[in-house]
Image: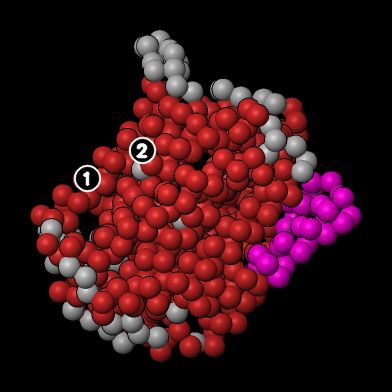
Amino acid sequence: MSRDLTEGSLRKNLLYMALPTMGGFAVQVLYDFVDMFWVGKISSQAIAGVALFSSIFWLVSVLNEIIGTGSVSMISQAYGAKAYERVNRTIEQTIVFKIFVAIIASAMLFVFLKPLIAFFSKDEGVIVAALDYGYWRIFFMPVFFATYSVYAAFRTTGESRLPNLMMAVGAVLNMILDPVFMFERVPGINVRGFNLGVEGAAIATVLSSSVVFVWGLVVLFRGHGVVRISLPGLFRLDWSIDRKLLTIGIPSAIEMLLRSLSGMVMMKLFGMYGSAVLATIGIMDRVGGLAYVPLMGFSMGASAIVGQCLGANKTDRAERTVLLAAIYSGIFVSVFVVLANVSPRIVIELFTKDPAVVREGLFAMRIVSWAVLIAGFSISLMSAFFGAGYTKAAMYSGIVGRWLVQVPYAILVAVVMRLPTSFLWFSSLVAELAELSYATVVFFKGKWKQQRVI
């Protein structure tokens, strides 16, 4: 059931929202591990291809961010103010907008995917793998975008368990379908599969996501607590809501676009060192995703609480929630830092035995782990901005960290000085330090506390 997060224990409310979210994301990350494990059975080129497409996919995901970010603050603040009709109306508008922008994103990416892939890699094996995987993901992008809105509708109204159960079911289904679609014989049970290779991994993903999306829509139409949407509501425009969704979301979308563009620049710079380094990035993305599980849990939980508290004009409670989330995030990620620095080889060799990739990954994992720890504090602080709808702060943070620090540093290392990749991996560390510095200053200035979007 939905939950009023403006009352009761801060710690209990934060853990109520964060722990189930962590569970859902943990299963999702486990899927990412398993997915990359199976892809690695094909070749290191297949790993590089999937990693390359994922980087490009995040570039067009800014369109998802335009609507999604605004919905978090608008739904949670309306719920905190007990304006339940507006809660349902905002959910309806968010789902429709997400599908619309996803269709635009799919069309754009379909046209430009092949040239983009060829720009980042000349390895034919990498290109083929990226395209085989990518075209399926592109076609089903409206389902992916709208599913995120279903999750947000539940979380922002204080329901943390159901969306994460949905994530977990989708991820488990994906893990089961992966080897069935990828291999001629399913490893371990020797059942005949479809033998579609990397393409099969993408098909498994879109099928499992579609199941979860339909499940979420059924629950929203039937009603869950005060949350209940209607089919006619999905076809009526409400400009008072739509305008705010765009106004709040555009700065966040710009921030995500700039992050994605910087990621593409970094991908190009790392790609100068060969396919083994690109494969390492794919592995680091999956390993880093594991560390981000607690961060996403506390960040999403804190954002929902901040939004509800600001809607109820309880600003002090909102601030204390964010600081508590930052403390918990640091504690959880510290465990990952220790493991990453003590035994990185064990993790890397789960994905590949390629000596070049293993050698590169040993150093990369240690640096990335410290970067994630620093990111944990900045992400927690920025949950205040997203809950308040004060998204410009997050946009400026991305500009500072990625474009004023990381990219110039990386160009200096890779292009100007032509240093080894070990120096290039440090770019993530300096970027996170810059973002944390900016987020800390803005958070304690406190302007976000006066922001309202209802």
Q: Quadrant of residue 215?
A: top left
Structural crowding at the residue carrying mark 1, measured as other residues with C-alpha within 10 Å and reported as few (<14), some (14–19) or many (≥20) = few
Is residue 403 shown in magenta?
yes
Q: Amino acid at mark 2?
A: Val
- On screen, 409 above or below 73? above
Would you say 228 lies left or right of 402 here? left
Instruction: Relative to 24, say whether 261 is above or below.
Output: below
Residue 296 picture location, percent across and down: 45, 58
The range drawn in magenta is 401-427
Nearest the viewer among 390 and 13 is: 390
The answer to which image quadrant residue 79 occupies is bottom left
Depth check, front residue: 370 or 219: 219
User: What is the three-letter code of the residue carrying label 1?
Assistant: Val
Task: Tell me the residue at 22%/50% (across/down).
Answer: 216
Residue 344 to residue 20: above or below: above
- 378 up-or-down from 22: above or below: below
Q: Secondary structure at mark 1?
A: helix
Depth check: give the residue in front, 57 or 379.
57
At a point 61% along the width and 58% down the height, the residue shown is 261
Q: Main secondary structure of the magenta part?
A: helix
Residue 117 shows in this picture: yes
Quadrant location, the C terminus: bottom left
Q: Secondary structure beneath disc 2?
A: helix
Q: Can residue 76 be seen?
A: no
Counting every numbered tag in the picture gives 2
Q: Which residue is mark 1?
A: 214
The residue to which callout 2 is attached is 206
Q: Residue at x 46, y 29 (%)?
A: 199
Q: Position of residue 148 (x, y in %)?
A: 34, 55
Residues packed near mark 2 inside 10 Å, few (<14), some (14 to 19) or many (20 plus): many
